[in-house]
Image (cartoon, grey):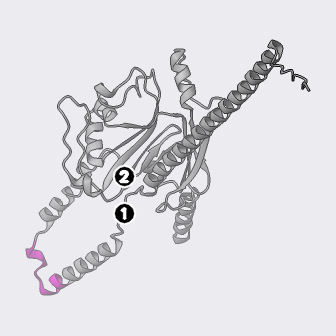
Amino acid sequence: MKTPRQNRHGLSLLELIVASAIAVVLMAGVSAAIHMYSKSVDVGRTNVEEAQLGRAVMKLMEDDLRNCIWKNDIDFSSVAELAADQTAGASELLDSTGLSGGIEMGDEAETLSNTTDLAASTTPAMQIGLYGNATELQFDMSRLPRVDEYDPEFVGFRSLAIADKPSDVKTVTYYLLIPGTAYQGVVGDPADRTAEQTGLVRRVLDRSVTQWAMENGDTKQLDASGEIVAPEVSYLNFRYFDGYEWYEEWDSAAMEGLPLAVDIVLAIRSADDRASAQQSDDPFVVGVAEGDMVYRRLIRIPIAVPIDPYAEEEALTETDSSMESGL
């Protein structure tokens, strides 16, 4: 008995084309999903890095500002009263013994009066404190040097940077480097300088070294001693609070103290935006652009006390009233 022969059919050309097309569509979808996932991962990583950078910059500025110092005036009124009482007692004793006429103290008194201004000649051009405006900040801070900072610092003869020295009083300067301006042109040594530099600059030098450079007009050396800590920063703004109102500028010598708090706002521009701007030769735009991440922090200065703007008027009023009552 003969069995029927089984017919075996293969894939037709049309079926093969349809299967290949479906496979191509599936592979394209998988590839697009992987690309979108990798792009989202890159964007998330960039956001995290920018957030970490913003927090690190704010933390650095906060640590410096919390160590800001102000001159400590010593009250010598009690010593002056004690000296006056002793002088009066000595005069009465000389008068009682009849020896006051034989002693002449005029020359000595004149010599002492001529030496009262010797300390003023050695003071720096600017008092210790905080000085700043809306875009720049300079202040003196007190911090013990690290162990490695006690080693002598040597600067090459080709370098324009100023040789710093170990000190517990440093002058710190923050400002935004703006390309194309004469005031904030370049930072660092000539070998490290690029055609266009941007970002947040931090300069830390011993206070006496900074004052010496300023008095001698060594602006190039001061610029060379700075460091760009965050080239991604595209905007920087400071405001100062005295306990009663906000100021756009602060002068410790004029305000007779430190601000109670400093409000800092900065913006960070992504590396992709900066790279695309450099490739297209577009000028660097200072400010907050679309896509920039803005950070803000209010920093309290521990040793600062509120400055009462009405204290001087009240003191003058009390003085006038006391004078009128005495009359």
Q: Which mark is residue 128?
A: 2
Residue 72, position in %: x, y?
Answer: 37, 62
| Left or right: residue 204 compared with residue 21 | left
**In the image, what residue occupies the spot 26% across and 58% down?**
147
Left or right: 3 as drawn, with respect to 209: right
Q: Which contiguous range is marked in magenta?
A: 93-103
| Predominant SS of the magenta segment | helix
Q: Is residue 28 above or below residue 305?
A: above
Assess whether residue 99 is covered by the magenta stretch.
Answer: yes
Q: Nearer the viewer, residue 130 or 309?
A: 130
Residue found farthest to the bottom: 96
Crowd class of label 2 (few under 14; some 14 to 19; many from 20; radius 10 Å): many
Q: Position of residue 277 (x, y in %)?
A: 55, 20
Q: Quadrant of residue 119?
A: bottom left
In this orientation, does residue 142 appear?
A: yes
Q: Earlier in the sequence, mark 2 or mark 1?
A: 1
Amino acid bearing label 2? Ile
Residue 98, position as x, y percentages in the image: 12, 83
Can you tell which of label 2 and label 1 is closer to the viewer?
Answer: 2
Q: Which residue is mark 1?
A: 73
Amino acid at dot 1 = Asp
Q: Which mark is residue 21?
A: none
Are discs 2 and 1 less than 8 Å apart at CB? no
